[in-house]
Amino acid sequence: MNAPTPEAQASPDSRRDIVGLARDQLAAEIAAMGEPAFRARQLWHWLYARGGRDFSRMTTMSKDFRAALEMRYRVSRPAIAQHQQSEDGTQKWLLRLADGSAVESVHIPEDGRGTLCVSSQVGCTLTCRFCHTGTQRMVRNLSAGEILGQILLARDEFGEWPAPSTNRRLTNIVMMGMGEPLYNYDNVAQALRIAMDPEGLAISRRKITLSTAGVAPLIKRVGAELGVMLAISLHAVHDELRDRIVPINKKYPIAELLRACRDYPPLKNARRITFEYVMLKGVNDSTADARELVRLIAGIPSKVNLIPFNAWPGAPFECSSNAAIERFAQVVMAAGYPSPVRTPRGRDILAACGQLKSASEKTRKSARAMDDPAPPATA
Ligand code: SAH
């Protein structure tokens, strides 16, 4: 069922993918092979600090052990189906997964840092009205290995194994690609734990941002178990409008969502929540909306990221004028909240927020169950 990887000549490759196994799972596998515990640690280092893909070259381990690993496991990466580069330096990869479905990840270079925007699902079930991904038909959860694979692949592409201490091209991760990360919590959490492991990729939790459309009951767990930065796709300040443009609001309305934000454990550590707010002309961009926003988030250490609407073919909205965005930002700023306007990046290659959509022929849903299934986009 798995497509052969370059390492595996025999097809089909029935070996298990070692990428994405949690540290304790890997330790258990190695112990079951009769090897001492330090071998698991060495292997982890090869996989996640050195980016090793070929067991035979992991030369700090015995030849027999390497051969035994080779028999049992493969070290997979998603295959690059398409690569595009924007005039502003943003890059987008369309990645083909072992079952033939596809996701996109995007790299956004900035002065002195670089952010990888990672997908958590093939498509998305949420149907937010302004988001292109929500119009995609096929939806399934990505495995931990497939989520992590996007990060590993970017490191491969940049040749950042081991990661250089300065001028790194990949410094930050945002779970802001395709899908709702909190509808795939377990796999996202497993991938992020591996990404944060200090003996591997060692990406600090402060450099990882998880964005959710508002799965309120899981927000506390994100804080307690992962401690990463949290972003909330708010986009509207009245339930009536939010019900329409971010339909998950019918399940978890604004008051419940903000209650979960107030209780977000890392806030006690002088951390801030980011509220994302897409600027839609004549829909949610009045100064009255801005005043209501400030009233809603009162007391929550936060910043408000204003996102100019990125259009896509057939989109039913227009972007607010610069003047309207400016007026909105002034009100938020005057109340004491930073309100940066997010510069659109990679619009020319449809890589900007909300533009990701990988055409997928399949409509069949994966057998893999969703944590909290919402109606599929085309139901
Ligand atoms: N499902 C998660 C992760 C997606 S993050 C979430 O909703 O937060 C992508 C961000 O881009 C979200 O804030 C999303 O609402 C926003 N977005 C979606 N479509 C957009 C568009 N066309 N223009 C600007 N921002 C958009």
Image: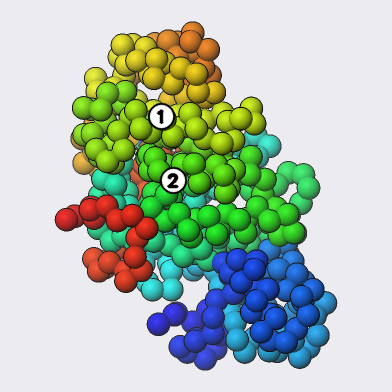
Quarter the C terminus occupies? bottom left
Horizontal and vertical percent position of residue 37: 76, 75
Three-letter amino acid code at disc 1?
Leu
Q: Nearer the viewer, residue 302 or 15?
A: 302
- Residue drawn at the location 37% of the way across and 71% of the way down: 100
Left/right of residue 156 with respect to residue 249 in the rendered view: right
Residue 35: x, y in percent?
75, 83
Q: How is colour applied across the structure in the image? A: rainbow
Residue linked to disc 1: 258
- Number of other residues with Cα within 10 Å of mark 2, as a class: few under 14, some 14 to 19, many 20 or more: some
Pointer 1 residue Cβ closer than 8 Å to ligand 1: no
Q: Is residue 121 left or right of residue 280?
A: right
Q: Residue at x 52, y 91 (%)?
A: 10
User: Percent position (x, y) of residue 96?
Assistant: 43, 67
- Counting from the top left corner in percent of width and height, residue 64 is at 76, 91
Q: Quadrant of ligand 1?
A: top left
Task: Work out whether mark 1 precedes mark 2 in sequence or the reverse, and give the earlier one.
Answer: 2
Disc 2 Cβ-to-ligand 1 distance below 8 Å: no
Number of marks in the image?
2
Label 1 environment density (alpha carbons within 10 Å; few <14, some 14–19, many ≥20): some
Which mark, residue 218? Answer: 2
- Compared with residue 97, is residue 227 higher up or lower down, i.e. above or below? above
Q: Amino acid at mark 2?
A: Leu
The residue sitting at the top extreme is: 334
Query: What residue lies at 66% left-to-right and 84% top-to-bottom?
Result: 32
Q: Quadrant of residue 161?
A: bottom right
At horizontal 50% and vertical 18% (from top left) the residue drawn is 299
